Amino acid sequence: MKRDHVLKRLKAIGLEVEIPPVATFYIWLNLENLPDPINNGLTFFEELLKEKTIVIPGIFFDVNPAHRRNLFNSPCHHFVRLSFGPPLEDLDKGRRSSITRSTLSNRRCIGIDAMERVLRKANKKGSHVFGHSYKKSIKDRAGLAVHV
């Protein structure tokens, strides 16, 4: 039930899940079709934290033990992992008022409403309002070494 609800909500806001989960309560969401820079897991994560909502950037799951590849060339760079384990209300709302810095790591609330706000902001204000150092480091390969 929760899985179907989350998949339906994500699709309604333009975030299509390529491979729906079958035996887990996680969704692996590809962000490649979003505007730059929110099309990468780190910036999407950063923008959702501002909304007091959490997703896990895909690069955190990249198996790269020898560090031969920088994070921005990771095959997981354009993904985030979402959990639909929390209560349904938390999945939709993200419980903005109840998530604090101390409880953020304990409450993996995806907050689809927060994702919708970030996407609306991108459509309304443009992508220049997003990102921190990630956007700069991707565009400036020479400066990438400073960030990696």
Image: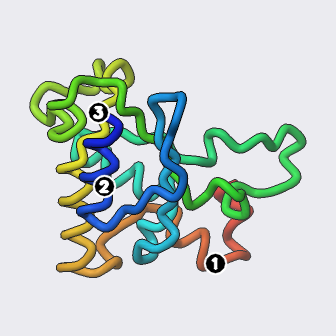
Tell me what residue is drawn at x 10 percent, y 31 percent. 97
Within 10 Å of disc 3 (Cα), the crowding (few <14, some 14-19, many 20+) is: some
Report the front residue among 42 and 140: 42
From the viewer's side, name the closer residue of 16 and 51: 16
The residue indicated by pointer 2 is 10
Q: Which residue is mark 3?
A: 2
Residue type indicated by callout 3:
Lys
Q: Residue 64: horizontal and vertical position, in percent? A: 81, 43
Residue placed under numbered mark 1 in the picture: 140
Say left or right for 24 vs 97: right
Q: Is residue 91 above or below residue 146?
A: above
Tell me which label, 3 or 2, sits earlier in the chain: 3
Secondary element under disc 2, as helix, strand or loop, is helix
Q: Is the residue under label 1 in contact with that under label 2 (CB below 8 Å)? A: no
Q: Say which of 126 and 31 sits in front.
A: 31
- Percent position of residue 117, x then y: 18, 60
Q: CA distance from mark 3 to mark 1?
A: 41 Å
